[in-house]
Image (cartoon, rainbow, N blue to C red):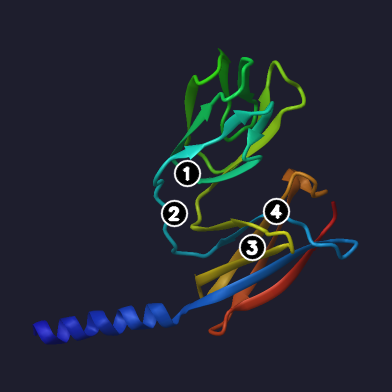
């Protein structure tokens, strides 16, 4: 009885591994140029949301948010340390997370927990030129496109999925392009063209 159960479990694990496939997405503008820094997500039914791990931070350095775009899982706590000699007042009016971190100085830090998925735009009440984004996701398949507009995921479950591309310059509601796709046993390789 134990051997049969062990064998069934092993067979199930092998079938699950075989059902995972690579996904490669290239993001290009209407002019054919690659769009780097776009956040590409793939949402597959039945895939659990990622668990927050490690430290997440958006620094204020050289009167900028660094990184400009940070991808975090739902439930992540993000630190906002000030590395500048001037004080900052970080805030967001975005629907997924509204917050207001009053003035604080160099080497001080504040934290915010992001408990809803979506894009959270960041600003500084003192420095209007500062902008940044925290992209909060409920899928483990989320990455920014590289300099060639390329995003790759190694093990996405085969089947019907939703592919989303977000970038602040995309001309679409929420700066997001969304479409469904079918991932076969050999995976998926496609190019998405966006207006920006």
**Relative to residue 108, is residue 4 depicted above or below?**
below
Q: Which residue is mark 4?
A: 38
Left or right: where does residue 101 sit relative to residue 166? left
- 88, 180: nearer the viewer: 88
Give the structural element (helix, strand or loop) at label 4.
loop
Q: Are marks 2 and 3 in contact (CB under 8 Å)?
A: no
Q: Residue at x 66, y 40 (%)?
A: 68
Instruction: Tell me which numbered mark, 2 or 3, is placed earlier along the sequence.
Output: 2
The reply to whether residue 120 is visible in this rendering is no
Left or right: where does residue 122 sit relative to residue 195? left
Query: Spatial distance from mark 2 to mark 1, Cα to Cα?
Result: 8 Å
Query: Spatial distance from mark 4 to mark 1, Cα to Cα?
Result: 19 Å
Total numbered labels: 4
Q: Are marks 2 and 1 in contact (CB under 8 Å)?
A: yes
Instruction: Tell me which numbered mark, 2 or 1, is placed earlier along the sequence.
Output: 2
Q: Are marks 3 and 1 in contact (CB under 8 Å)?
A: no
Instruction: Tell me which numbered mark, 4 or 1, is placed earlier along the sequence.
Output: 4
Mark 1, other Cα within 10 Å: few <14 / some 14–19 / many ≥20:
many
Image quarter where the N terminus lies is bottom left
Q: Residue furthest right?
A: 31
Q: Which residue is mark 2?
A: 49
Q: Residue at x 39, y 50 (%)?
A: 51
Query: Spatial distance from mark 2 to mark 3, Cα to Cα?
Result: 16 Å
Give the mark toward the camera: 3 or 4.
Answer: 4
Q: Residue at x 37, y 83 (%)?
A: 15
Give the structural element (helix, strand or loop) at label 2.
loop
Q: Residue at x 70, y 15 (%)?
A: 126
Q: Residue furthest top?
A: 103
């Amino acid at each position: 009885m134990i051997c049969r159960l062990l064998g069934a479990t092993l067979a199930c694990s092998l079938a699950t591994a075989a059902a995972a496939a690579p996904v490669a997405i290239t993001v290009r503008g209407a002019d054919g140029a690659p769009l780097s820094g776009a956040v590409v997500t793939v949402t597959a039914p039945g895939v659990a949301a990622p668990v927050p791990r490690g430290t997440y931070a958006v620094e204020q350095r050289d009167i900028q948010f660094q990184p400009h775009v940070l991808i975090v899982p739902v439930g992540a706590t993000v630190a906002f340390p000030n590395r500048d000699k001037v004080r900052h007042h970080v805030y967001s009016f975005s629907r997924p997370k509204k917050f207001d971190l009053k003035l604080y100085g160099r080497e001080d830090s504040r934290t915010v927990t992001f408990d809803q998925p979506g894009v959270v735009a960041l600003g500084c009440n003192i420095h209007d030129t500062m902008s940044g984004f925290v992209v909060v996701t409920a899928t483990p398949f989320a990455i920014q496109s590289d300099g060639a507009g390329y995003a790759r995921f190694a093990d996405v479950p085969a089947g019907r999925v939703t592919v989303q591309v977000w970038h602040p310059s995309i001309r679409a509601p929420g700066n997001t392009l969304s479409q469904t796709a079918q991932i076969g046993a050999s995976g998926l390789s496609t190019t998405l063209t966006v207006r920006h």
